[in-house]
Image (spheres, rainbow, N blue to C red):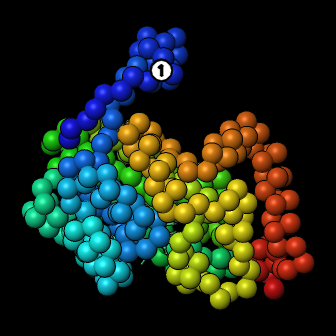
Amino acid sequence: MSRGVRTNVAAVGRHGDRWWEGARASTVECMELRDKVVVVTGGASGIGLGLTERFHAEGASHIVVADLDEAGAVAAAKRVGGTGVALDVSDEAAVAALVEQAEDAHGPIDLFVSNAGYVTVGGLEIDDSEILGMFDVHVMAHIYAARAVLPSMIARGEGYLLNTASAAGLLAQVGSLAYTVTKHAAVALSEWIAITHGYQGIKVSVLCPQAVATNITENSPSRDRPGGGMLGVAARDGVLSPDQLADTVIEALAAERFHVLPHDEVATYVERKASDVDRWIGGMQRMQARLYGDNPQPGDWLVS
Ligand SMILES: NC(=O)c1ccc[n+]([C@@H]2O[C@H](COP(=O)([O-])OP(=O)(O)OC[C@H]3O[C@@H](n4cnc5c(N)ncnc54)[C@H](O)[C@@H]3O)[C@@H](O)[C@H]2O)c1
C-alpha cells in the first residue's frame, strides 16, 4: 500500500523514558485512499453509505458495498462505480466468500470497513437470543472479517481495518444493555488486533461516534418498544451528518489514529471515566434519571 510520510510534531522519540512514549513514533505513515480497494459493510445506508461516497471522492479504485439490504447495496455501489452485494456479516462463510471474490475480481483489499450494525432498547429482561444476535453482528462480524482478510494483508505486510463501534463502546448506552456490551467488546477486539498484528503491518482504527443522522432508529428491531430515547443520550452533543463524520474518518485514517472520535467531547468523557469511574457512574445515573423523567426507568423494565 502506498503511503505518504508526515511528521508528527507532538510525537515523543523512541527513546522516551516511558514505554508508552517510546511507542509513539516520531513519524507517521499516512493511509491514503487513492487507488485503494475498499470493502464497506452496512454500506447501503447511513454511516456506511457516507463513507462509501467519501472514499470514492478520495480516489479509491474500487469499493465493494456489502449489506443485508441487497438493493440498497447495489444502489450505493452504482453511485461510486463499485460492486454491491448481499451479505449477512454474522455469516462467517459468506464473509470469507465475499473477501475471496473481491480479491479475485479487484485485487488485494487495502481497507476493510466493518460497519454494519443496529441498535436496540432493553435491559436484563430481554431474551438471550437478542443479546447473542447483537453479539454476532457487532463482535463476531469483526472477527470474521479480520480472519478472512488478514492473512493476505499480513503476506503483503500492510492492510487496514476500520471497525465501527460507538461512543457507547467507550462509555455506555443508557437503556441498552446489549448495545453497550457488544460495542465495548468491539472496541476491545479492535485494540487486541492492533496490539497483536501491528508488527505485521496491520493498522486498526475504531470509529466511536455519538449521534449521527442515519436510519438506525427506523432500522431497529425494538423501535416500537416502550423506553425509546436512546439516541436522546447520544444526541446531547449534537447530531452529525454522515458527511461530517466522514471528515473525521479521513483525517484519522491519514494519521492512522486508533480512536476515531467525530464528537470531540467523547475524549473528555473517556478521560473523566478513567480518572474517577465512581463519579462517572454517578453522572450516568443522573443522566438516565433525567432522560426518562416520569416514564418508567430502564431498571423498572425488569420488574414491571
Ligand atoms: N447513527 C448513530 O447515531 C450511530 C452512533 C454510533 C455508532 N453507530 C454505528 O454505526 C454503524 C452504522 O449504523 P448507521 O447509523 O449507519 O445505521 P443504518 O441503519 O443507517 O445503517 C446500518 C446498515 O447496516 C446494515 N446491516 C445491519 N445488520 C446487518 C448484517 N447482519 N449484515 C449486513 N448488513 C447489516 C443495515 O441493513 C443498514 O444498511 C452501526 O454499527 C452503528 O451501531 C451509529
Left or right: residue 247 compared with residue 119:
left
Picture quarter containing residue 193?
top left
Residue furthest left as drawn: 104
Q: Position of residue 258 (x, y in %)?
A: 46, 41
Q: Is mark 1 within 8 Å of ligand 1?
A: no
Q: Nearer the viewer, residue 85 or 147?
A: 85
Q: Position of residue 236 (x, y in %)?
A: 73, 60
Q: Nearer the viewer, residue 126 or 180?
A: 180
Left or right: residue 59 compared with residue 142:
left
Left or right: residue 169 compared with residue 246:
right
In this rendering, the answer to whether 192 lies above or below 223 is above
Residue that numbered label 1 is attached to: 9
| Residue type of the residue flagged with mark 1 | Val
Residue 87 visible somewhere in the drawing = no
- Residue neighbourhood size for the residue with mark 1, other residues' Cα within 10 Å, grouped as few (<14), some (14–19), many (≥20): few
Picture quarter containing residue 3?
top left
Which residue is pictured at 22% across the width and 68% down the height? 81
Which residue is pictured at 82% across the width and 45% down the height? 279
Residue 84 visible somewhere in the drawing = yes
In this rendering, the answer to whether 247 lies above or below 64 is above
Q: Position of residue 277 (x, y in %)?
A: 75, 44
- Quarter of the image where the N terminus is located: top left
